């Protein structure tokens, strides 16, 4: 297939970004001034969480998603950490559970009440102590609700069994600070980037390094698994100080499959991958734009589609899970952009333009649900399981969407026929009168 024919056949070539109106934004938020390269924002269909500036320890706001507008300066916060909060992540399985890591060397698990916070929360559901230096990264396992990973400035990754509240494994394969972690789809592999310029593919249960790439000419900053394509994508800086992306075969890291230079800016380039649509989004820290590509298993591998532009620089971006999309608007991805200078969180929707109001099955394939596919003990014993368990739920959801569309169509047809009947009755009445 030629480049031209592939581009023409792509159903995502006209995707565009739409910034939320002022009524949909969250204003008056004292966003953290931390220079740590992280997002400082996490979102799910219930809540928006943002790391904030605070005196005497670390804190973050949790705002009910359906309550945009200006946030009260005295809005309650989660403020149990003794040092600045460095990372926050919502559980993929329970919308009220959020994990946070901090400069106080701990990871804490919090349970947020359904209606949001009414007073400051200082008591965590669980405090995980194991790192000797500040904890910069946390990552939930994608299919097991009881497993959480944390990476600290002690150059160690700890695997936590949350069902027992203990660390069950320490991965000590990195000689320097870990910059990024990414699980593959079923959580059987872990990709990491490190300050030593090496990209690693690790078996998280054994801690064994399966593949290693020595990126001597490139500083690799971020890494992400590309769904089931058996590929990983990295972002970094080339020897000429230009930002670049590289695509790798997860089973052979001897050389990248392809590399592409992006620009000469200095901010860290964050990659976001949507496995449902095979779309890749690139957003630089301090940039105002978001580039997006379509990923394919064959050449050209990465097809640039378009760019969302905004004059306001982003400090970080939260991403809504796919189950929180507005399918009626053909929304396939949604960012929550932190604008520090304005104290603003702005939603940005990526939309496929479609004229039909019916459910668009081709752009909304079955996606990950909220049911855990296996227990912590099962995963630790060596079992890998994807989303098969939640498949029936997703199939039912798909059937519900289809039935709702059919009902809407039938109601429209019925309304049209009722109107036609009224017109005919009126014509018949006029004929009789004449």
Image: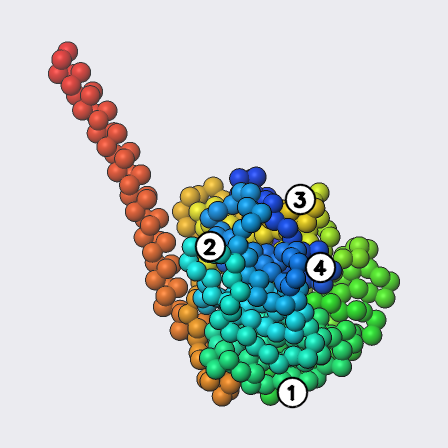
| Number of marks drawn | 4
Quarter of the image where the N terminus is located: bottom right
Quadrant (top left, top right, bottom left, bottom right) of the C terminus: top left
Label 4 vs label 3: CA separation?
16 Å
**Residue at image x 72%, y 81%?**
174
Residue 425's quadrant in the figure? Answer: top left
* Residue 351 disc label: none
Between the C-alphas of marks 2 and 4, the distance is 26 Å
**Disc 4 designates what residue?**
34
The percent coordinates of residue 123 (x first, y second) are: 51, 68
Q: CA–CA distance between discs 3 and 2? A: 25 Å
Front residue of 170/255: it is 170
Q: Residues within 10 Å of mark 3 (few under 14, many from 20)?
A: few
- The disc placed on residue 208 is 1
Q: Earlier in the sequence, mark 4 or mark 3?
A: 4
Q: Nearer the viewer, residue 144 or 264?
A: 144
Asked if marks 1 and 3 touch (Cβ < 8 Å), the reply is no
| Residue at the disc numbered 3 | 342
Q: Is residue 284 visible?
A: no
Q: Nearer the viewer, mark 2 or mark 4?
A: 2
- Chain-order first, disc 1 or disc 4: 4
Dot 1 crowding, Cα within 10 Å, few <14, some 14–19, many 20+: few
What residue sits 67% from the left and 44% below the top? 342
Q: Secondary structure at mark 2?
A: loop
User: What is the crowding at mark 2: few (fewer than 14 residues within 10 Å), some, or many (at least 20)?
Assistant: few
Closer to viewer: mark 1 or mark 3: 3
Q: Earlier in the sequence, mark 2 or mark 4?
A: 4
Q: Is residue 270 above or below residue 177?
A: above
Q: Position of residue 352 (x, y in %)?
A: 53, 48
Residue, far front: 56
């Amino acid at each position: 297939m030629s480049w031209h024919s592939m581009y023409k056949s792509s159903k995502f070539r006209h995707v565009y970004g739409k910034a939320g109106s002022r009524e949909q934004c969250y204003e008056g938020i004292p966003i953290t001034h931390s220079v740590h390269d992280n997002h400082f924002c996490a979102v799910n269909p219930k809540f928006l969480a943002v790391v904030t500036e605070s005196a005497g320890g670390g804190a973050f706001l949790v705002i009910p998603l359906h309550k945009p507008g200006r946030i009260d300066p005295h809005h309650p916060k989660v403020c149990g950490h003794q040092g600045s909060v460095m990372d926050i992540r919502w559980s993929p399985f329970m919308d009220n559970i959020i994990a946070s890591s901090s400069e106080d060397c701990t990871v804490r698990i919090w349970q947020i009440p359904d209606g949001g916070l009414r007073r400051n929360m200082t008591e965590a559901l669980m405090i995980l102590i194991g790192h000797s230096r500040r904890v910069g990264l946390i990552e939930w396992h994608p299919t097991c609700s009881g497993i959480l990973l944390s990476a600290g400035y002690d150059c160690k990754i700890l695997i936590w069994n949350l069902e027992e509240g203990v660390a069950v494994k320490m991965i000590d394969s990195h000689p320097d600070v870990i910059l990024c972690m990414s699980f593959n789809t079923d959580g059987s592999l872990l990709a990491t980037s490190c300050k030593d310029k090496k990209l690693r593919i690790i078996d998280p249960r054994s801690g064994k390094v399966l593949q290693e790439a020595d990126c001597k000419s490139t500083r690799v900053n971020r890494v992400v698994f590309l769904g089931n394509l058996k590929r990983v994508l990295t972002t970094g800086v080339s020897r000429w100080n230009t930002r670049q992306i590289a695509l790798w075969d997860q089973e052979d890291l001897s050389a990248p499959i392809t590399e592409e230079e992006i620009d000469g800016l200095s901010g860290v380039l964050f990659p976001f991958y949507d496995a449902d649509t095979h779309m890749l989004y690139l957003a630089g820290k301090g940039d105002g734009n978001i580039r997006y590509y379509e990923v394919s298993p064959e050449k050209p591998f990465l097809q640039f589609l378009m760019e969302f532009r905004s004059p306001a620089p982003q400090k970080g971006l939260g991403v809504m899970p796919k189950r929180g999309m507005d399918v009626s608007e053909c929304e396939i991805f949604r960012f929550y952009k932190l604008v520090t200078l304005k104290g603003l969180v702005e939603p940005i929707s990526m939309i496929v333009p479609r004229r039909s109001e019916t459910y668009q099955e081709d752009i909304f394939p079955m996606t990950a649900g909220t049911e855990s596919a296996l227990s912590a003990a099962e995963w630790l014993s060596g079992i890998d399981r994807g989303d098969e368990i939640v498949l029936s739920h997703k199939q039912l959801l798909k059937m519900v969407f289809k039935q709702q569309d059919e009902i809407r169509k039938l109601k429209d047809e019925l309304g049209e026929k009722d109107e036609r009947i009224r017109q005919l009755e009126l014509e018949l009445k006029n004929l009789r009168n004449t």
